[in-house]
Image: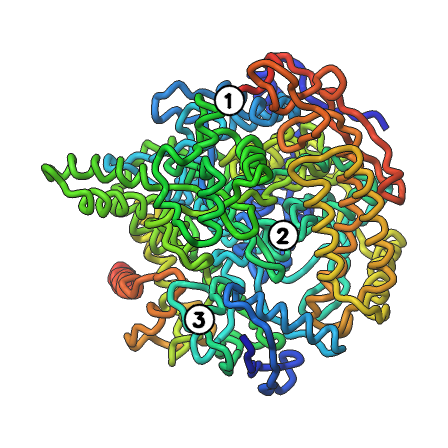
Amino acid sequence: MNLTLKIWRQKDASSKGQMVDYKVTDISEHMSFLEMMDVLNEQLINSGEEPVAFDHDCREGICGMCSMYINGEAHGPDRGVTTCQLHMRMFKDGDTITIEPFRAAAFPVIKDLVVDRTSFERIQQAGGYISVNTSGNTQDANALPISKHAADEAMDAATCIGCGACVATCKNSSAMLFVGAKVSQYALLPQGQVEAVDRVKNMVAQMDLEGFGNCTNTGACEIECPKGISLDNIARMNRELMKASVKG
Amino acid sequence: MALDSKVPKGPIKDKWTDYKNKINLVNPANKRHIDVIVVGTGLAGGSASATLAELGYNVKAFAYQDSPRRAHSIAAQGGINAAKNYQGDGDSTYRLFYDTVKGGDYRSREANVYRLAEVSANIIDQCVAQGVPFARDYGGLLDNRSFGGVLVSRTFYAKGQTGQQLLLGAYSAMNRQIARGKIEMFNRHEMLDVVIVDGKARGIIARNLITGEIERHSAHAVVIASGGYGNVYFLSTNAMGSNTTAAWKIHKKGAYFANPCYTQIHPTCIPRSGDYQSKLTLMSESLRNDGRIWVPKNMDDVLAIREGRKKPTDLSEEDRDYYLERRYPAFGNLVPRDVASRAAKERCDAGYGVNATGEAVYLDFASAIERYGKEQAKIQGIDNASKEKIIALGENIVEAKYGNLFQMYEKIVDENPYKTPMMIYPATHYTMGGVWVDYNLMTTVPGLYCIGEANFSDHGANRLGASALMQGLADGYFVLPYTIGDYLADDIRTGPISTETKEFEDAEKDVRDRVDFFINNNGTKSVDYFHKRLGKVMWDKVGMARNEKGLKEAMAEIKAIREEFWKEVKVPGNANEMNPELEKAGRVADFLELGELFAKDALIREESCGGHFREESVEESGEQKGEAKRNDKDFAFVAAWEYKGEPADAVLHKEELEFNDIELKQRSYK
């Protein structure tokens, strides 16, 4: 198929960006979206132009590096996928595709489609861990039975890949799905109880400090999340925060 | 230089404990004055960074991605082995040790493997304490599954995302130390050289991938944890950015590179679909617990399927060749990876491949779905359940076990694997070879360590499933943090290492010169053009089956591609900005050297062992006819290569392998 691409080009963080039109031809429906971008870049290199910078790495939907906003949706039109798992069979010959970076005040553009998501790092550093020494002198793993239900639910929350699609999708640029997922993973497990109060307070405080917006329950994040992280995690985070404020 | 593995004396089961008791330690107050650089933040680098920081060292950690959580350990699916014997099925430290040495086709260092098995149980304790949500049974205890090449269930898992959960565990431990200021994290930085001062590794030169700035970083020791070199094949299951640059740079500065030809071609990957393909996707080995691998028995059916006249589900049981079950009745679909891969290649080379390219076999879940469905019907008390009901119940169980893998497959191939068998074919996945290290995980350069997939030590010529995660975390959490203290104990009075020295200046100049060369070269062809050509030579001539003629041709062809690369490569953009093509150019330049050494290593190893299969070395007769033939008399050694300029001129050093606790035998999975 032949396609027209409208792509956000921006030299660096301090420059102004703009949409630029490109054409690609002979795109196979079996290609992934990023392989289509590879075709475009090879074309640009061969014609002496600068290729489009975009983040990507594992190309199997787990590293969370790829981050495009395609036709107004984070990771494009398919559901339950990252951009690297999006295939060209979702598009038709002659389509015009608009490709932008994730937009949020807390995700400044570095170049073209690459954004800076280190705000997520700082939120995790504020409390996204259990303070246990890595010395190996811990108790036997089976000394602490955990109900299958709790373990499975914690696992569902823990599958977040930290891509930021929730933030890019949210009209308020809220990071609550991301933070809620991490808070939930630990809240659901007995190992997480000891530090529960400080964890939720510190992570939420850092989230606010980074300039992420609030949650107004539209649920768009849950729909666009490539890993199907449930909105319940936000509710659980709010409950944890409430409990923490009571406990002091 | 003679290779000294520094394996401690004494019985194998006491070596590590005795050694730890006698090793030099650094006083906690002195650790504050010692800096350690860790390059790479996957399972090995992440766990090492966290543990070293927790012990009190100042750690500087480097990752080319925007976060340690993106390292490719994240993509490991199936699980992590540990000799817990929770299933009571006869597992033990010795058995895990034995399976790993046998699985590696007797080409690994016994003492290292025993230590790995010994600390494996502790890894699970550690990860559970960190909040890693492993799968559990209804009693709340940890669940296990089986992996290839073993007869026990010792693999712990978190759905099909075990690597992700373990990495996030190590990442959380890192975050705790980053918050305390004990780890300084350098995201989006790439190490481009190591700096050696007075014969010791004392720092690195790194490029800030956002600004293009070339930076000097000093430390008392440098740890390389940069993963494997599978991308030398261009197409592999590695991440796009996975590269050999850090490992290759230290090789060029004196670290020996061991057994580069030991590369794992994983049997269950989604087949290639076209020339535009940028990478291959793995389908976890855990699927072989329940999936049965087959091709049609009759050529008529093969052609009918390729032409779309028949579907795989149309073929009756009698018309299917479950070739692994046929050839290896004892292990069946759970033979080790190298054996499964070669068997797939054998069938496809004979013309029985089931897709248009002729390079695909089926992985079929129909019988597992039926078996689970019947079991569920019984559990739920449904008498006389209909076939549809049984299938629906069975599909639910299969979904709970492998849902994310099935979804991944469906998104890529656009077929529903619950209803029709998956198509799979082998692809490059893991590299057992790597930087040579001694028992302390130190390279041949003092103060320079190498851990995880980047080193060579534990997997011999073939790695068993679910052992990569085990090794990465064992090295990082439990081995390196002890052994590095022995070296650093001599550095407590050294004080900060200055970066204002000639050594740093020279190393920085070399890096700058190379960056400037690429930017100014104005060639005619993209980096990918050369990378794809290299990959094709590697796959065709240094792939699943190798022979003398092909390997000699490969060496010459790679050299020619390398020469053309330096003349014709074209890198757009500038040096002082984010420039992904510039990053790729540097990495491919190193792959073009490694590839030739790889072929040379394969050439001198005139035996078949593990992932290295020489067509000249097969069993001629008997029960094992046609199987790989190992030659212990002449080749029970580690091939450690010393850099001498051109890869073809590398000098071979042999570390003879001694087996005192395991009898060398032909691997039989029949």
Numbered tag placed on residue B411 in the rendering: none
Q: CA distance from mark 1 to mark 2?
A: 29 Å
Could you tell whether B541 is left or right of B507 in the image?
Answer: left
Residue that badge 2 annotates: B235
How packed mark 3 is, by other alpha carbons closer than 10 Å (few <14, some 14-19, many 20 or more), is few
Label 2 sits on a secondary structure element that is loop
How packed mark 1 is, by other alpha carbons closer than 10 Å (few <14, some 14-19, many 20 or more), is some
Residue at x 49%, y 30% (from the top left corner): B120
Task: Identify residue type, mark 1.
Answer: Tyr
Residue that badge 1 annotates: B669
Task: Identify residue type, mark 2.
Answer: Leu
Q: Is residue B50 visible?
A: no
Q: CA distance from mark 1 to mark 3?
A: 45 Å
Label 3 sits on a secondary structure element that is helix
In this rendering, is residue B413 above or below B636? below
Residue at x 70%, y 24% (from the top left corner): B617
Task: Identify residue type, mark 3.
Answer: Met
Is label 1 in contact with label 3 (beta carbons under 8 Å)?
no
In this rendering, is residue B568 above or below B599? below
In this rendering, is residue B295 above or below B637? below
How packed mark 2 is, by other alpha carbons closer than 10 Å (few <14, some 14-19, many 20 or more), is many
Query: At which x and y percent is residue A13?
Result: 62, 79
Query: Mark 1 vs mark 2: which is more N-terminal?
Result: 2
Residue at x 77%, y 38% (from the top left corner): B550
Quarter assignment of residue B266: top right
Query: At which x and y percent is residue A202?
Result: 40, 62
Query: At which x and y percent is residue B475?
Result: 59, 36
- Using the image, name the chain to which the residue with label 1 belongs: B
Residue that badge 3 annotates: A90
